[in-house]
Image (cartoon, coloured by chain):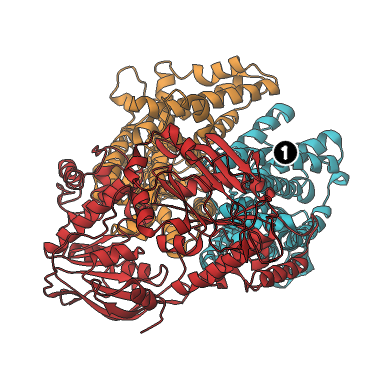
Amino acid sequence: MGVRGRVPVKSFSRPLTTKSMKDIFTLTLILSTIHLATPLVLAALGGLYSERSGVINIALEGLMLAGAFTAAAVTHYVGNPWVGLLAAIVAGILLASIHAVACISFKADQVVTGTAINILMIGVPAVLSGAFFLSSGSTPQIPKENLIPWTPVILALLLVVATYYILYYTPFGLRLRAVGENPEAADAAGINVKRIRYTGVLISGALAAIGGAYLSIGQSSLFTRNMTSGRGFIALAALIFGKWRPVQTMLACLLFGFADALSTQMQGVIDIPVQFIQMIPYVLTMVVLAGFIGLSRAPRALGIPYQKER
Amino acid sequence: MKRCPTCNRTYSDETLSFCLADGALLSASEDPQATLTLPSSQDPQETLRIPASQIPQVTQPSPSAPKTTALELRNITKRFGDVLANDHVTISVMPGTIHAIVGENGAGKSTAMRIAYGFYTADSGDIIVDGEVRDIKTPHDAIALGIGMVHQHFMLVEPMTVAENIVLGAEPGSVAGLDLKKAAAEIRALSNEFKLSVDPNATIESLSVGQQQRVELMKALYRRARLLILDEPTAVLTPQEVEEFFAILRNMREQGKTIIIITHKLSEVLAISDDVTVMRDGRVVGELKTKDTNAAELARLMVGREVLLRVEKSEAKPGDVVLSVRDFSVTARDGSRRVDKVSFDVQRGEIVGIAGVEGNGQTELIEALAGLVDPARVSGRVEYLARDITNANARTRKEQGIAHVPEDRHRRGLLLDFNLAENSILGIHYRRPAVAGLGGILLNDSGIQKRAAQVIKDFDVRPPNPELPARALSGGNQQKLIIGREFELEPKLLLVSQPTRGVDIGAIEFIHRKLVSLRDAGCAVLLVSAELEEVTALADRLLIIHEGRIVGEVDPKQATTEEIGLLMTGGKG
Amino acid sequence: MKLLRQLIFPLIAVVAAFLVGAIFVLLIGDSPVETYRQLLGNAFSWPDGIGYTLFNATPLIFTGLAVAVAFRCGLLNIGAEGQLYVASFATAWVCILFGGVVVDVFGQPVNYSIVSLPAIILIPLGCLTAIVVGALWGAIPGFLKARFGSHEVINTIMMNFIAVALVSYFTQYHYKVPGDPILETAPVGAAAHIPRLGKFIPGLPERIPLNLAFILALIACALVYIFLWRTKWGYEIRATGANPTAAEYGGINVRKQIVLAMAVSGGLAGMVGINEVMGYRYRYYDGFSDNYGFTGIAVALLGRNHPVGVIFAAILFAILSRGGIFVDAFTEHVSKDLVQVLQGTIILFVAAEAIFRGPFGRFGLLKRSKV
């Protein structure tokens, strides 16, 4: 949510000081694209489960922050990134359950609630890091052997396949889609709409948190204030661009990841101020959103609380 | 064919002599004796005066009826806020019968059945299924008890396939994998058994309304429903489709299914049902055998007095042409043509009605004439008072004297969270008397209040408090507010769509009288209504629309319902 | 009675959020009582407490109004942060360009301006710049929504990042005094300074930066009220927010309203620049905003999107943001970021006010007229 504190992530592609245009388009760029797309894919898939069930999840940013902070903090204390990842998932689910309770049970405005969670997540990690690490919003460095640079990448890919299968070939997927399109019809068919929506939102918390965890204990080695720097929102845009479908969404994330990687690679090569290079992913998001939203059909019940007269 | 006199179950096996369901002696006759004690249906005024608390006793099945009901609602009461939707409602449905529940809009028919299906929970009363009191809290419970429901608004997920819709909530296969092949096979088998021809792999969006309805039936059958509740199933069907549909229902009855059909069309009750329950104002006011009653009696029970849908009006004196529509077409966003080259005129001092089955382009025609459709999606020519207004926007049209009562008052007609005063200036909020001062920028409170008071007074909007949000009004009063607002514009042309939908009887008459008086004052009126009775009663000329085309014009005083019905289905013209 | 109903939910939401915050503080290991004493207790002293609180409230009134206006049109403007940055920078730029000779950080007189305008022209010009630039920046996501239907929340967020990068570029490469270690522009001309209230109020020292922009904020509240409820434009914006299809039926150009509402919203957010540049720091200081744009969301929601409510909510959050400094300084573990936690929680409770409607609704006091 905050707009400051964007940390350029370069751990996999440290740019050389003497580079030319030719050096930009290399294997490094591809690897960098994949790495930068991974948190987006995870968060966007999370968003997919929530939004396909009919709940707007603008809280992806906050959920990612929760995952990033928890993963780094727990890994620091326990010394085991897997425990950190697991804790991040738990934190994501807990935070998402706030969104779920407010939006599903109390029919709060989904966008406002999501925004509240995002603001909350500027504060909570900062307060906790102040209390535990005596810092103003960062966790201590995690040693290199305790990082998980590749697992989330593979996990993200597997999750794309799994989500595709779940969405179209399992009863849960069928119900999820039905609830997001026409909750009344699903209700009439004997489906518990609230339960499906809760499940969708909680899954989104878990996945977005994994995405966040990857930022802090995969790509870099610590949590810094607002380290997601808008990735939750970019993931959301990718979800829209990908028409709320898993494979297309992944491709959209790769596009945004590419833009991010390119901007990282270009720094110090081309004589453009760093600020303009940093803008690329954001401008691209807006362009994509404006150009393709008309072609994309949102789940019809998206954003509408299911109100049943009793 | 043998029929059980007590439960109406029919048996094609001539050798049977006892009913398999309740052991009663079967009669060979097609006309079994009625065995239920009926409430006095001779004098409807009498029934009206029966206190609510006594009605259950009146309608309870006589002790001489020995068999088990398929479904029984006993003393069901349900309140929505201040509205008593069901007041000690008791309904008994015998197995293997088609049972009609009739009543006016808002009589409580759908509420009672939605309670039986677990969509609503009753405040008090019991639901008895196959002789046992059951606790039905959700549709899931109802489905488990063999109850299926086809809702008035289809409960289908449009982008999904027929098979996906049918199995939804009762999926074959395991948690890990959906077996849609098995489902498709089962659907085909059911489709053959009940003579419903539906392709399991088609998406719902691609189906006609009639086919969608069959998918709904299939959903219930797939869940092994023994009792089917159908809420206004024919509202969206053409007369021909209704016939086909009834054939399907009769076939289901033969197969032993019990069917409850909610309707307000008496001809259908007489055509299809075995028993009838009549509801009015949330209460059961009659329970009859169909063969022992007739349309007039049912109508009296429904309305509580002689039906008078004849509107008192004098002969129209049409003047100059106000609206002239030529080769006018409207295309939907998806590219389909909704209105197809229609041409007609509306003159001063006449009401031109447009009759047709809903969804045949009426909505799009009226919205386009009101200027609410993107000019890129219309073609042809519209002239108003000899001026071309084909591309004019809604505001310009309103300024020139075209008022519009939209068909959906919640979506279009009202700002539900705004108060009555603010609603009374919607559309004229930028000009006098709504604004004054600073060159017409500031809203003029006294002008707005005056306008609101005028509308409230002239159109009897209750409660008459301009500070109340529109949401707080009943449907009838909301409608009166909209009509009042539009009439206050002193229009030269009124476009009016479904003016009395969901409105109580008293308000209907009021609105009809107002429409006629507006006509007599020299306004041209273009009226669309799904209620054939309403358009024929009000219109001076009647155009019939089918699939976006005007397929005929009749004199509503001369034409018979059959004639109009045939045109509505594209049968002639 | 009506007023009581309007007040009760925000009050409950604040109290509930403070309770949640207290539990949070307790878990961290500090005393909630002491923490809240630091957070709230320093706000009421004269002149520092009140002076600084009102000074801190000034930008929050602007951003709160900004979010409220957009909200009345059914839009959530999360982009006030970006709008106020761009507008503040532009204000500084104009006030440098037309400000004449100034004294830079090294105490040297320098002239960056092309012409020196007198205060009577430069001050209105600076204000106008803040409003217009904010409005333009806000109108872009409005236009994108009206034209393409892309969601304003994502676009305003993206534009926040773009705005921050853009103004940081301009500051760094074009308007920084060479050698200045801080990322800030050269000072604006003295003619662009608007007076501090200490000039007019006895007992209020001029070191307290509370300035005329606060009065301007109050005027803006009145104007927003008149605009929304007393003009035909406001009617159209509110109608669009209440029911866009009905607004369309009423001859209102819904797309135009979306752009207009976002422009007005952006203009209000941009007015933060008047307080910041012309009333407080007299230069553009990169990264000055203490999340004003996001706090504006909490201010608007807590103030029920009404100008009067916005004033009170802004003062509350101003107390919190100043109190945060004392929390940082005087409590052992808790940092000022607690304020953000409270903010998020308050929004959450206001959004899901149905949580409170259950237990209290029974008594009829809180029942809505009819749902």
Q: Is residue B77 above or below residue C161?
A: above
Q: Is residue A37 above or below residue C230?
A: below
**Residue matched to label 1:** A91
Q: Is residue B55 visible?
A: yes
What is the x, y in percent for residue A24? 72, 68
Residue positioned 40% across, 80% down in the render: B570
**Residue plotted at (17% across, 54% down):** B488
The x, y position of residue B299, in whole percent, is: 35, 54
- Colour cyan belongs to chain: A
Q: Nearer the viewer, residue A98 or B390?
A: B390
Image coordinates of residue B545 in percent, x first then y, are: 35, 75
Direction from residue C343 to residue B180 in the image, left or right: right
Chain appearing in orange on the rendered image: C
Q: Which is more toward the observer, B302 or A123?
A: B302
| Quarter of the image where one finds residue A134 | top right
- Give the colour of chain B: red
Looking at the picture, tell me which residue is in the foreground, B333 or A2. B333
Left of C146 or right of it: where is C344? right
Taking the image as drawn, is residue A197 in sight? no
> Quarter of the image containing the C terminus of chain B?
bottom left
User: Circle 1 — which element?
Assistant: helix
Residue lying farthest bottom? B573
Chain bearing mark 1: A
Amino acid at the residue labelled 1: Ala
Out of C205 and C300, give the one closest to the viewer. Answer: C300
- Left of B364 or right of it: where is B260? right
